[in-house]
């Protein structure tokens, strides 16, 4: 339980004059943030305050040694006016797993969800009321101790910041263009941090991503770190291939982030009795299918991207493209069903969404 939440509201909202369509993804934040501190063995002092800089020791273990993990989810304002979270229990469980991997004390699931809910209530006006738009929520758990030796921190901070976002898929685009990265590795095949949403993984990905963008691609498609052959994932997205009517996605392991969207996509495919295989898939197999004309679709999925078609892979000198440009049949159906559930247009048969009751009075101090 989130007890003793203190709320300090901003004197001047930045919302008037804010235009979500004029922002790059994630570069402006809503009025408030959440912060909680872990000290003497317990999470304490939950507070919502105006968004702004926080004091950090320069020798903080997070800064030096990347003992930081994070999450990503969205608050949706439904077509019916209802605000919803999508499977926040899965994000809470993944955060706990990421924390365990980095020796960080877990944030209890109820605290995690209540903190997001409380922040969403304070910044409800920041949740865009347009189809496909949402308030992206970024929880962060980070090591606070200033210390030069390498050991887990004793003190931590749990922050939540939010940013309004538009739809990921640009009108007029066929989909993502990804560069298959054959030299650099996001995460080692076994024993590394790849399955944790750990800050260090994203540091590891920067150089390849930067080169790919300079070469005109949207992102990198990562291969396994041992053979540089088996497809892993793309940036902040898991990937799926439709080959001869069967859907294939790489199996989870130490090097792949277990996406909530991936898990949901697999469940929806099983509902529709579409053949879905979680198995190792070589980049050579994808390229060969494209050559034969049996690569029906490729798509990526994640909270930000929902389901987004991949138009093209650059693999060595070959351009690997699916038979259809843009959304294929399966990607389209998944996109419609996922966003339908998230925005309250379709029945939520699995209990995936959690409504945020905005009529509840904000806690004392508001
Ligand atoms: C967050 C993330 C994903 C997607 O996870 P979702 O829970 O679906 O948003 C995929 N890959 C990586 C590396 C990620 O960090």
Image (cartoon, rainbow, N blue to C red):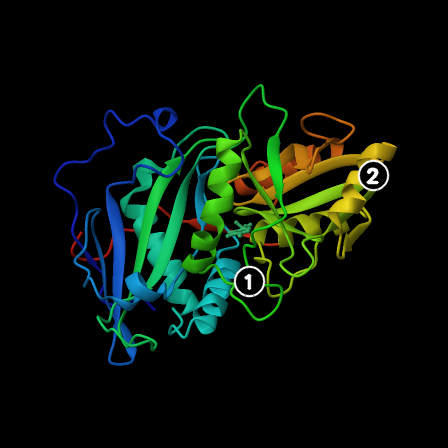
**Label 1 sits on residue:** 195
| Residue 219, image x, y percentages | 54, 38
| Of 105 and 49, the residue lying toward us | 105
Left or right of residue 44, residue 365 in this image: left
* Residue 156 against residue 264 in the figure, above or below: below
The residue at 48%/37% (across/down) is: 78
Query: Can see residue 12?
Result: yes
| Of 47 and 101, the residue lying toward us | 101
Marks 2 and 1 sit apart, C-alpha to C-alpha, by 28 Å
The mark closer to the camera, 2 or 1, is 2
* Residue 22 against residue 133 in the figure, above or below: above
| Residue 138, image x, y percentages | 38, 50
The residue at 54%/55% (across/down) is: 186
Say which quadrant the N terminus sits in.
Answer: bottom left
Left or right of residue 154, residue 107 in this image: right
| Residue 207, image x, y percentages | 47, 46
Left or right of residue 328, residue 15 in this image: left
Q: Check disc 2 and report its element: helix, strand or loop.
A: helix
Pointer 2 residue Cβ closer than 8 Å to ligand 1: no
**Label 2 sits on residue:** 289
């Amino acid at each position: 339980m989130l007890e003793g939440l203190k709320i300090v509201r901003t004197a001047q909202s930045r919302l008037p004059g804010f235009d979500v369509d004029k922002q790059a993804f994630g570069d402006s934040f809503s009025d408030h943030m959440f912060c909680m501190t872990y000290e003497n063995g317990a999470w304490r002092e939950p507070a919502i305050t105006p968004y702004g800089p926080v004091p950090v020791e320069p020798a903080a273990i997070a800064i030096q040694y990347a003992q930081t993990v994070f999450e990503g989810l969205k608050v949706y304002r439904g077509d019916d006016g209802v605000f919803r979270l999508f499977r926040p229990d899965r994000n809470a469980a993944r955060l706990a797993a990421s924390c365990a991997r980095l020796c960080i004390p877990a944030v209890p699931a109820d605290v995690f969800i209540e903190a997001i809910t409380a922040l969403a209530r304070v910044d409800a006006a920041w949740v865009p009321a347009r189809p496909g738009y949402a308030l992206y929520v970024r929880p962060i758990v980070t090591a606070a101790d200033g210390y030069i030796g390498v050991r887990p921190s004793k003190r931590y901070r749990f922050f939540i910041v939010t940013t309004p976002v538009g739809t990921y898929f640009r009108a007029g685009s066929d989909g993502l263009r990804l560069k298959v990265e054959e030299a650099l590795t996001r995460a080692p095949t076994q024993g590394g941090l790849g399955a944790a949403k750990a800050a260090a993984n994203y540091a590891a990905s920067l150089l390849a991503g930067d080169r790919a963008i300079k070469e005109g691609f949207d992102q990198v498609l990562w291969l396994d770190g041992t053979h540089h052959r088996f497809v892993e994932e793309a940036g902040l997205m898991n990937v799926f291939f439709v080959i001869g009517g069967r859907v294939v996605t790489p199996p989870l392991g130490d090097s792949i982030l277990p996406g909530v969207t991936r898990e949901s996509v697999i469940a929806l495919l099983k509902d529709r009795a579409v053949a879905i295989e979680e198995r190792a898939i070589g980049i050579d197999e994808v390229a060969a299918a494209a050559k034969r004309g049996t690569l029906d679709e490729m798509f990526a999925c994640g909270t930000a991207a929902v389901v987004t078609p991949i138009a093209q892979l650059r693999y060595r000198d070959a351009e690997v493209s699916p038979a259809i440009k843009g959304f294929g049949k399966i990607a389209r159906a998944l996109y419609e069903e996922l966003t339908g559930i998230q925005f309250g247009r379709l029945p939520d048969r699995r209990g995936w969404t959690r409504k945020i009751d905005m009529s509840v009075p904000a806690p004392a101090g508001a």
